[in-house]
Image (cartoon, helix red, strand yellow):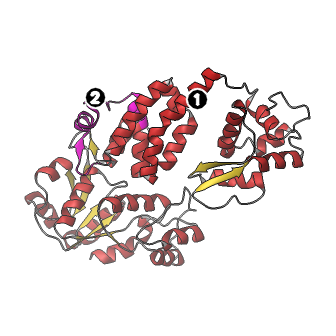
Amino acid sequence: MDLTPATAPIDEPRLRRLLGDSGLVWLVERARRRMERGQSLTGPVSLGTPTEDQRASAERLLGRSPGRGRSLTVRLDVVDAVLRRSGISRDGLGAAVIALTGPVVPLGPAREAEERGWREAYAVIEALADRDPALAAWADRLRGDGLVRRLAGTPAAAHDLLERVATALRALPVGEPESLPAFAARVLGDAHALDDGIPLVTLTLSGVRALTGFPDGTGAEWRRRAWASAGLLRDELSSTVLTLNLRGTSALDWMAEQGEPAVLTLRQLSRCPPAASVPLVRLCENPAVLAAAADTHGPRSAPLVCLQGQPSAAALALLRHLHERGTTLHYHGDFDWGGLRIASVLLRHVPWRPWRFTAVDYRDAVRAGVAGPPLTGRPTEAPWDPDLPRALEELGVRVEEEAVLDRLLSDLS
Protein backbone atom coordinates (compact mmCIF):
# COMPACT_ATOMS: atom_id res chain seq x y z
CA MET A 1 0.00 0.00 0.00
CA ASP A 2 1.31 3.48 -0.89
CA LEU A 3 1.70 5.44 2.36
CA THR A 4 3.24 8.55 0.79
CA PRO A 5 1.40 11.87 1.21
CA ALA A 6 -1.29 12.75 -1.31
CA THR A 7 -0.24 14.21 -4.65
CA ALA A 8 -3.68 15.62 -5.45
CA PRO A 9 -4.86 18.56 -3.31
CA ILE A 10 -7.14 17.81 -0.34
CA ASP A 11 -9.96 20.10 0.72
CA GLU A 12 -9.03 19.97 4.41
CA PRO A 13 -11.91 22.12 5.80
CA ARG A 14 -14.48 19.89 4.11
CA LEU A 15 -12.52 16.75 5.06
CA ARG A 16 -12.46 17.69 8.74
CA ARG A 17 -16.17 18.49 8.70
CA LEU A 18 -17.01 15.17 7.05
CA LEU A 19 -14.47 12.53 8.11
CA GLY A 20 -12.90 14.41 11.04
CA ASP A 21 -16.18 14.39 12.97
CA SER A 22 -15.88 12.96 16.51
CA GLY A 23 -18.49 10.35 15.63
CA LEU A 24 -16.14 8.87 13.01
CA VAL A 25 -12.94 8.65 15.10
CA TRP A 26 -13.44 4.88 15.31
CA LEU A 27 -13.65 4.61 11.50
CA VAL A 28 -10.49 6.64 10.89
CA GLU A 29 -8.61 4.59 13.52
CA ARG A 30 -9.67 1.31 11.89
CA ALA A 31 -8.54 2.57 8.48
CA ARG A 32 -5.21 3.76 9.89
CA ARG A 33 -4.55 0.39 11.57
CA ARG A 34 -5.14 -1.35 8.23
CA MET A 35 -2.69 0.99 6.57
CA GLU A 36 -0.09 0.32 9.26
CA ARG A 37 -0.44 -3.41 8.62
CA GLY A 38 -0.31 -3.07 4.86
CA GLN A 39 -3.93 -4.16 4.42
CA SER A 40 -6.26 -2.83 1.74
CA LEU A 41 -8.84 -0.15 2.50
CA THR A 42 -11.76 -2.22 1.22
CA GLY A 43 -14.53 -4.24 2.76
CA PRO A 44 -16.58 -3.60 5.90
CA VAL A 45 -15.59 -2.37 9.36
CA SER A 46 -18.09 -2.61 12.24
CA LEU A 47 -18.66 -0.88 15.57
CA GLY A 48 -20.65 -2.65 18.29
CA THR A 49 -23.43 -0.74 20.09
CA PRO A 50 -22.82 2.65 18.41
CA THR A 51 -24.18 5.89 19.87
CA GLU A 52 -26.77 7.98 18.07
CA ASP A 53 -24.03 10.55 17.28
CA GLN A 54 -21.91 7.84 15.65
CA ARG A 55 -24.88 6.67 13.57
CA ALA A 56 -25.67 10.26 12.53
CA SER A 57 -22.04 10.90 11.54
CA ALA A 58 -21.97 7.75 9.40
CA GLU A 59 -25.22 8.80 7.72
CA ARG A 60 -23.78 12.24 6.86
CA LEU A 61 -20.66 10.58 5.45
CA LEU A 62 -22.50 8.04 3.30
CA GLY A 63 -25.50 10.17 2.40
CA ARG A 64 -27.85 7.44 3.59
CA SER A 65 -28.78 5.59 6.74
CA PRO A 66 -26.27 2.82 7.63
CA GLY A 67 -29.09 0.76 9.17
CA ARG A 68 -30.54 0.36 12.67
CA GLY A 69 -29.01 -2.96 13.75
CA ARG A 70 -27.17 -3.41 17.04
CA SER A 71 -23.84 -2.73 15.30
CA LEU A 72 -22.80 -0.07 12.79
CA THR A 73 -21.10 -1.31 9.59
CA VAL A 74 -19.40 0.91 7.00
CA ARG A 75 -17.58 -0.27 3.87
CA LEU A 76 -14.18 1.40 3.47
CA ASP A 77 -14.31 1.20 -0.32
CA VAL A 78 -17.60 3.13 -0.25
CA VAL A 79 -15.98 5.84 1.91
CA ASP A 80 -13.06 5.94 -0.53
CA ALA A 81 -15.46 6.47 -3.42
CA VAL A 82 -17.33 9.25 -1.57
CA LEU A 83 -14.07 11.14 -0.93
CA ARG A 84 -12.87 10.80 -4.53
CA ARG A 85 -16.24 11.64 -6.11
CA SER A 86 -16.81 14.70 -3.91
CA GLY A 87 -13.37 16.11 -4.65
CA ILE A 88 -12.53 16.28 -0.93
CA SER A 89 -9.67 13.78 -1.38
CA ARG A 90 -9.07 12.79 -4.99
CA ASP A 91 -6.45 10.26 -3.86
CA GLY A 92 -9.08 8.55 -1.70
CA LEU A 93 -9.36 7.34 1.87
CA GLY A 94 -5.68 6.59 2.46
CA ALA A 95 -4.65 10.16 1.65
CA ALA A 96 -7.50 11.47 3.83
CA VAL A 97 -6.38 9.40 6.82
CA ILE A 98 -2.83 10.74 6.51
CA ALA A 99 -4.14 14.32 6.27
CA LEU A 100 -6.21 13.84 9.43
CA THR A 101 -3.81 11.80 11.58
CA GLY A 102 -0.31 12.30 10.20
CA PRO A 103 2.12 10.02 8.33
CA VAL A 104 1.49 6.29 8.63
CA VAL A 105 4.52 4.15 9.50
CA PRO A 106 4.17 0.44 8.65
CA LEU A 107 4.36 -1.82 11.67
CA GLY A 108 7.53 -3.81 11.97
CA PRO A 109 7.61 -7.22 13.65
CA ALA A 110 8.08 -5.67 17.11
CA ARG A 111 5.22 -3.22 16.68
CA GLU A 112 3.00 -5.94 15.28
CA ALA A 113 3.78 -8.16 18.29
CA GLU A 114 2.97 -5.27 20.64
CA GLU A 115 -0.36 -4.61 18.93
CA ARG A 116 -1.15 -8.30 19.10
CA GLY A 117 -0.39 -8.15 22.82
CA TRP A 118 -2.84 -5.30 23.27
CA ARG A 119 -5.54 -7.18 21.37
CA GLU A 120 -4.98 -10.22 23.57
CA ALA A 121 -5.14 -8.03 26.70
CA TYR A 122 -8.61 -6.79 25.72
CA ALA A 123 -9.89 -10.32 25.06
CA VAL A 124 -10.99 -10.80 28.68
CA ILE A 125 -13.33 -7.80 28.64
CA GLU A 126 -14.63 -8.78 25.20
CA ALA A 127 -15.55 -12.20 26.64
CA LEU A 128 -17.21 -10.44 29.58
CA ALA A 129 -19.25 -8.26 27.21
CA ASP A 130 -20.31 -11.34 25.22
CA ARG A 131 -21.65 -12.83 28.45
CA ASP A 132 -23.38 -9.63 29.61
CA PRO A 133 -24.65 -7.30 26.82
CA ALA A 134 -24.92 -4.44 29.35
CA LEU A 135 -21.11 -4.25 29.17
CA ALA A 136 -20.81 -4.18 25.36
CA ALA A 137 -20.66 -0.40 24.95
CA TRP A 138 -18.29 -0.15 27.93
CA ALA A 139 -15.92 -2.70 26.40
CA ASP A 140 -15.97 -0.87 23.06
CA ARG A 141 -15.17 2.40 24.81
CA LEU A 142 -12.23 0.89 26.73
CA ARG A 143 -10.76 -0.45 23.49
CA GLY A 144 -11.13 2.88 21.72
CA ASP A 145 -10.45 5.70 24.19
CA GLY A 146 -6.87 4.83 25.15
CA LEU A 147 -7.57 4.85 28.90
CA VAL A 148 -6.28 1.31 29.48
CA ARG A 149 -3.08 2.06 27.58
CA ARG A 150 -2.49 5.19 29.67
CA LEU A 151 -3.17 3.41 32.95
CA ALA A 152 -1.29 0.19 32.23
CA GLY A 153 1.53 1.27 29.92
CA THR A 154 2.30 -2.17 28.47
CA PRO A 155 0.22 -5.03 27.06
CA ALA A 156 1.37 -7.37 29.85
CA ALA A 157 0.34 -4.92 32.57
CA ALA A 158 -2.97 -4.30 30.79
CA HIS A 159 -3.64 -8.03 30.62
CA ASP A 160 -3.17 -8.41 34.40
CA LEU A 161 -5.20 -5.27 35.13
CA LEU A 162 -8.14 -6.23 32.92
CA GLU A 163 -8.15 -9.78 34.32
CA ARG A 164 -8.70 -8.31 37.79
CA VAL A 165 -11.33 -5.89 36.51
CA ALA A 166 -13.21 -8.77 34.87
CA THR A 167 -12.91 -10.86 38.05
CA ALA A 168 -14.53 -8.08 40.08
CA LEU A 169 -17.29 -7.36 37.55
CA ARG A 170 -18.22 -11.03 37.17
CA ALA A 171 -19.15 -10.98 40.88
CA LEU A 172 -21.29 -7.83 40.60
CA PRO A 173 -23.86 -6.74 41.52
CA VAL A 174 -23.83 -8.69 44.77
CA GLY A 175 -27.01 -10.37 45.93
CA GLU A 176 -26.89 -8.93 49.45
CA PRO A 177 -25.14 -5.68 50.46
CA GLU A 178 -21.48 -6.25 51.36
CA SER A 179 -18.69 -4.01 52.58
CA LEU A 180 -16.26 -2.96 49.87
CA PRO A 181 -13.15 -4.23 51.73
CA ALA A 182 -14.81 -7.58 52.44
CA PHE A 183 -15.76 -7.95 48.76
CA ALA A 184 -12.22 -7.04 47.67
CA ALA A 185 -10.75 -9.59 50.05
CA ARG A 186 -13.20 -12.32 49.00
CA VAL A 187 -13.02 -11.79 45.24
CA LEU A 188 -9.58 -10.25 44.64
CA GLY A 189 -7.67 -11.62 47.61
CA ASP A 190 -6.78 -8.19 49.02
CA ALA A 191 -9.00 -6.05 51.26
CA HIS A 192 -7.33 -2.90 49.89
CA ALA A 193 -7.54 -3.87 46.21
CA LEU A 194 -10.41 -1.42 45.61
CA ASP A 195 -9.06 1.51 47.62
CA ASP A 196 -9.39 4.89 45.88
CA GLY A 197 -6.83 6.24 43.46
CA ILE A 198 -5.61 3.16 41.61
CA PRO A 199 -6.23 2.02 37.99
CA LEU A 200 -8.19 -1.07 39.09
CA VAL A 201 -10.76 1.16 40.82
CA THR A 202 -11.02 3.54 37.84
CA LEU A 203 -11.81 0.75 35.40
CA THR A 204 -13.98 -1.31 37.74
CA LEU A 205 -16.13 1.69 38.65
CA SER A 206 -16.63 2.46 34.96
CA GLY A 207 -17.83 -1.13 34.53
CA VAL A 208 -20.12 -0.81 37.55
CA ARG A 209 -21.74 2.22 35.92
CA ALA A 210 -22.36 0.17 32.77
CA LEU A 211 -23.89 -2.65 34.82
CA THR A 212 -26.16 -0.53 37.01
CA GLY A 213 -26.88 2.55 34.90
CA PHE A 214 -25.42 4.81 37.59
CA PRO A 215 -24.70 8.31 36.18
CA ASP A 216 -21.22 9.67 35.61
CA GLY A 217 -19.63 11.91 38.24
CA THR A 218 -16.62 12.62 40.42
CA GLY A 219 -15.68 12.92 44.07
CA ALA A 220 -15.75 10.71 47.15
CA GLU A 221 -19.53 10.89 47.61
CA TRP A 222 -20.14 9.93 43.98
CA ARG A 223 -17.78 6.95 44.31
CA ARG A 224 -19.54 5.83 47.49
CA ARG A 225 -22.92 5.92 45.77
CA ALA A 226 -21.59 4.27 42.60
CA TRP A 227 -20.24 1.33 44.60
CA ALA A 228 -23.50 1.16 46.53
CA SER A 229 -25.45 0.86 43.25
CA ALA A 230 -23.80 -2.57 42.87
CA GLY A 231 -24.37 -3.45 46.54
CA LEU A 232 -20.89 -2.57 47.84
CA LEU A 233 -20.74 -0.34 50.90
CA ARG A 234 -18.08 1.72 52.57
CA ASP A 235 -20.17 1.58 55.76
CA GLU A 236 -23.67 0.69 56.95
CA LEU A 237 -24.74 4.21 58.00
CA SER A 238 -24.22 6.27 54.85
CA SER A 239 -26.70 4.25 52.79
CA THR A 240 -30.27 5.35 53.62
CA VAL A 241 -33.84 5.18 52.38
CA LEU A 242 -36.74 7.59 53.01
CA THR A 243 -40.14 6.25 54.10
CA LEU A 244 -43.55 7.52 55.18
CA ASN A 245 -46.07 5.61 57.32
CA LEU A 246 -44.22 2.33 57.06
CA ARG A 247 -44.72 0.38 60.28
CA GLY A 248 -43.06 -2.62 61.86
CA THR A 249 -40.65 -1.29 64.51
CA SER A 250 -41.35 0.84 67.57
CA ALA A 251 -39.60 3.81 65.98
CA LEU A 252 -41.44 3.43 62.66
CA ASP A 253 -44.78 2.97 64.43
CA TRP A 254 -44.25 6.22 66.35
CA MET A 255 -43.29 8.15 63.20
CA ALA A 256 -46.33 6.75 61.35
CA GLU A 257 -48.63 7.90 64.16
CA GLN A 258 -47.24 11.40 63.68
CA GLY A 259 -47.41 11.15 59.89
CA GLU A 260 -43.75 12.16 59.65
CA PRO A 261 -41.11 10.83 57.22
CA ALA A 262 -38.49 8.42 58.56
CA VAL A 263 -34.93 7.82 57.37
CA LEU A 264 -33.74 4.23 57.66
CA THR A 265 -30.07 3.25 57.42
CA LEU A 266 -28.78 0.00 56.04
CA ARG A 267 -27.53 -0.82 59.55
CA GLN A 268 -31.08 -0.54 60.92
CA LEU A 269 -32.50 -2.63 58.09
CA SER A 270 -29.84 -5.31 58.53
CA ARG A 271 -30.41 -5.59 62.28
CA CYS A 272 -34.09 -4.78 62.74
CA PRO A 273 -36.13 -4.76 59.51
CA PRO A 274 -39.84 -3.81 59.68
CA ALA A 275 -41.84 -6.73 61.05
CA ALA A 276 -45.28 -5.63 59.86
CA SER A 277 -46.86 -7.15 56.73
CA VAL A 278 -48.10 -4.51 54.27
CA PRO A 279 -50.28 -5.55 51.30
CA LEU A 280 -49.19 -2.66 49.07
CA VAL A 281 -46.46 -0.04 49.22
CA ARG A 282 -46.06 2.74 46.66
CA LEU A 283 -42.61 3.89 45.55
CA CYS A 284 -41.54 7.26 44.16
CA GLU A 285 -38.32 8.68 42.75
CA ASN A 286 -38.26 12.18 44.27
CA PRO A 287 -38.43 13.36 47.92
CA ALA A 288 -40.85 16.15 46.95
CA VAL A 289 -43.59 13.53 46.48
CA LEU A 290 -43.07 12.04 49.93
CA ALA A 291 -42.88 15.48 51.57
CA ALA A 292 -46.14 16.50 49.89
CA ALA A 293 -47.82 13.28 51.04
CA ALA A 294 -46.73 13.98 54.62
CA ASP A 295 -47.96 17.60 54.41
CA THR A 296 -51.27 16.71 52.77
CA HIS A 297 -52.29 13.42 54.37
CA GLY A 298 -50.05 13.06 57.42
CA PRO A 299 -50.78 9.82 59.31
CA ARG A 300 -53.62 9.04 56.85
CA SER A 301 -51.25 8.62 53.90
CA ALA A 302 -50.76 5.17 52.45
CA PRO A 303 -47.25 3.77 53.00
CA LEU A 304 -44.68 5.33 50.68
CA VAL A 305 -40.98 4.70 50.02
CA CYS A 306 -38.78 7.24 48.19
CA LEU A 307 -35.68 6.14 46.25
CA GLN A 308 -34.20 9.66 46.05
CA GLY A 309 -32.84 8.91 42.59
CA GLN A 310 -30.81 5.76 41.99
CA PRO A 311 -31.87 3.01 44.44
CA SER A 312 -29.43 2.82 47.34
CA ALA A 313 -28.32 -0.38 49.02
CA ALA A 314 -30.62 0.51 51.91
CA ALA A 315 -33.58 0.99 49.55
CA LEU A 316 -32.93 -2.31 47.83
CA ALA A 317 -32.59 -4.11 51.17
CA LEU A 318 -35.90 -2.67 52.36
CA LEU A 319 -37.76 -3.43 49.13
CA ARG A 320 -36.45 -6.99 48.95
CA HIS A 321 -37.56 -7.48 52.56
CA LEU A 322 -41.05 -6.16 51.78
CA HIS A 323 -41.34 -8.26 48.64
CA GLU A 324 -40.31 -11.42 50.50
CA ARG A 325 -43.06 -10.72 53.05
CA GLY A 326 -45.69 -10.57 50.31
CA THR A 327 -45.91 -6.82 49.73
CA THR A 328 -46.85 -5.66 46.22
CA LEU A 329 -44.72 -2.71 45.11
CA HIS A 330 -46.06 0.01 42.79
CA TYR A 331 -43.51 2.45 41.33
CA HIS A 332 -43.67 5.93 39.81
CA GLY A 333 -40.77 8.04 38.51
CA ASP A 334 -39.97 10.94 36.22
CA PHE A 335 -41.04 10.58 32.60
CA ASP A 336 -37.62 11.12 31.06
CA TRP A 337 -34.74 8.89 29.98
CA GLY A 338 -33.05 9.14 33.36
CA GLY A 339 -36.29 8.17 35.10
CA LEU A 340 -36.69 5.14 32.85
CA ARG A 341 -33.13 4.03 33.60
CA ILE A 342 -33.67 4.28 37.36
CA ALA A 343 -36.89 2.26 37.04
CA SER A 344 -35.14 -0.39 34.93
CA VAL A 345 -32.31 -0.71 37.46
CA LEU A 346 -34.87 -1.18 40.23
CA LEU A 347 -36.72 -3.80 38.19
CA ARG A 348 -33.56 -5.84 37.87
CA HIS A 349 -33.39 -6.08 41.67
CA VAL A 350 -37.01 -6.38 42.78
CA PRO A 351 -40.35 -6.82 40.95
CA TRP A 352 -42.77 -3.90 40.85
CA ARG A 353 -45.86 -2.76 39.00
CA PRO A 354 -46.24 0.67 37.38
CA TRP A 355 -48.01 3.34 39.42
CA ARG A 356 -49.31 5.82 36.83
CA PHE A 357 -46.06 5.12 34.98
CA THR A 358 -47.08 3.90 31.52
CA ALA A 359 -47.33 5.37 28.04
CA VAL A 360 -51.02 6.07 28.62
CA ASP A 361 -50.23 8.02 31.80
CA TYR A 362 -47.48 9.98 30.05
CA ARG A 363 -49.72 10.95 27.15
CA ASP A 364 -52.51 11.94 29.56
CA ALA A 365 -50.11 14.18 31.48
CA VAL A 366 -48.87 15.90 28.31
CA ARG A 367 -52.44 16.45 27.12
CA ALA A 368 -53.24 17.97 30.50
CA GLY A 369 -50.57 20.61 29.92
CA VAL A 370 -48.13 19.63 32.66
CA ALA A 371 -45.19 18.87 30.37
CA GLY A 372 -41.79 20.25 31.31
CA PRO A 373 -38.70 21.09 29.23
CA PRO A 374 -37.68 19.23 26.07
CA LEU A 375 -36.48 15.66 26.47
CA THR A 376 -32.70 15.26 26.39
CA GLY A 377 -30.25 12.38 26.77
CA ARG A 378 -29.87 8.91 25.35
CA PRO A 379 -33.07 6.84 24.82
CA THR A 380 -33.54 3.64 26.76
CA GLU A 381 -36.06 0.83 27.12
CA ALA A 382 -38.91 0.37 29.59
CA PRO A 383 -39.43 -3.38 30.14
CA TRP A 384 -42.69 -2.81 32.03
CA ASP A 385 -44.23 -0.93 29.06
CA PRO A 386 -42.47 -1.09 25.65
CA ASP A 387 -44.78 1.66 24.35
CA LEU A 388 -43.45 4.20 26.87
CA PRO A 389 -40.09 4.94 25.16
CA ARG A 390 -41.89 5.35 21.83
CA ALA A 391 -44.29 7.84 23.43
CA LEU A 392 -41.39 9.84 24.90
CA GLU A 393 -39.62 9.98 21.54
CA GLU A 394 -42.84 11.01 19.80
CA LEU A 395 -43.82 13.82 22.20
CA GLY A 396 -40.30 14.82 23.19
CA VAL A 397 -40.97 16.46 26.56
CA ARG A 398 -40.22 15.59 30.18
CA VAL A 399 -42.92 15.14 32.80
CA GLU A 400 -41.47 15.23 36.30
CA GLU A 401 -43.19 13.69 39.31
CA GLU A 402 -43.86 17.12 40.82
CA ALA A 403 -45.93 18.02 37.73
CA VAL A 404 -48.41 15.18 38.41
CA LEU A 405 -48.32 15.50 42.19
CA ASP A 406 -52.09 15.93 42.54
CA ARG A 407 -52.73 12.60 40.80
CA LEU A 408 -50.18 10.79 42.94
CA LEU A 409 -51.51 12.30 46.17
CA SER A 410 -55.04 11.20 45.28
CA ASP A 411 -53.83 7.59 45.28
CA LEU A 412 -52.28 7.98 48.73
CA SER A 413 -55.33 9.25 50.58
Task: Tell me the magenta residue range.
Answer: 174-203
Q: Residue at x 20, y 49 (%)?
A: 266
Image location (x, y in percent) of residue 366: 52, 74
* The quadrant where residue 178 appears: top left
Q: Earlier in the sequence, mark 2 or mark 1?
A: 1
| Label 2 residue SS | loop
Q: Reply yes or no: does residue 270 show up in magenta.
A: no
Image location (x, y in percent) of residue 403: 45, 68
Assign the N terminus to one quadrant of the image. Answer: top right
Query: In this view of the protein, which residue sits in the foreground, 365 or 13?
Result: 13
Name the kind of residue labelled 1 in the image.
Glu
Which residue is under mark 2?
Answer: 192
Q: Residue at x 37, y 57 (%)?
A: 345
Which residue is under mark 1?
Answer: 115
Q: Nearer the viewer, mark 2 or mark 1?
A: 1
> Can the viewer see residue 225 in this picture?
no
